[in-house]
Image: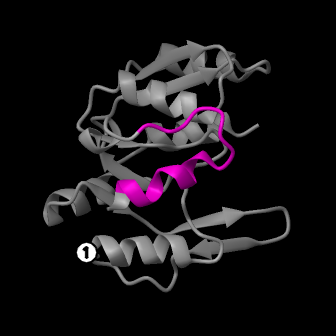
Amino acid sequence: AYIDRCLRSIQQQSYSCLEILVVDDGSVDKSLQICEKFAAADTRIRILSQKNRGVSAARNTAVENARGNYIAFVDSDDWVEPTYIEKMLSACLANHTSMSACNHWIHTSTRCIQRFRGVPSGVLTARTACENILYDAPPDVSPWGKLYDEKLLRKIWYPVGKCYEDTFCIAELVL
């Protein structure tokens, strides 16, 4: 239901030198056909298909196949603002960091919740970043809303078959 909006938002990034990897994790709806239509029209899009193994396996497949220096995850029901990658990459490069994170909103049928609204912009120590991520209520352990140096993700894999798989990785990624 959301993949079209998701892919359009990634295609329209102000930082256009992107490799867009779409991991089809054994979808049984029309998602793959929608993604193939986008890939036919945009050479930056590569589709990687696998049997359904879950979100962790899909993220690991993307990391294994990524060719770029930085990696951002965008789930199929997400969309990103046009300057998302540009600003996240600028933050990493300007501050010599291997990870950047940003504010984001969670939309539900009844409300919109803004995350990280009280966190000031700037470079945080690993401890402060961990505290902000883990002590927020509920904690923001999600891999999306962040940009990672690819070397960081190649050391830390998402555990396949675990619920809340991102909780296993976030502290290690930040530290």
Whether 31 is drawn above or below 5: the answer is above
The residue indicated by pointer 1 is: 123
Q: Quadrant of residue 24?
A: top right
Q: Quadrant of residue 57?
A: top right
Q: Position of residue 92 (x, y in %)?
A: 23, 58
Q: Position of residue 154 (x, y in %)?
A: 32, 35
Magenta highlight range: 157-173
Visible residue check, residue 70: yes
Whether 115 is drawn above or below 152: the answer is below
**Mark 1 belongs to which amino acid?**
Val
* Residue that appears at 59% across and 69% down: 139
Whether 41 is drawn above or below 170: the answer is above
Q: Secondary structure at mark 1?
A: loop
Whether 85 is drawn above or below 175: the answer is above
* Residue that appears at 37% across and 54% down: 173
* Residue that appears at 36% across and 51% down: 147
* Residue that appears at 44% across and 77% down: 131
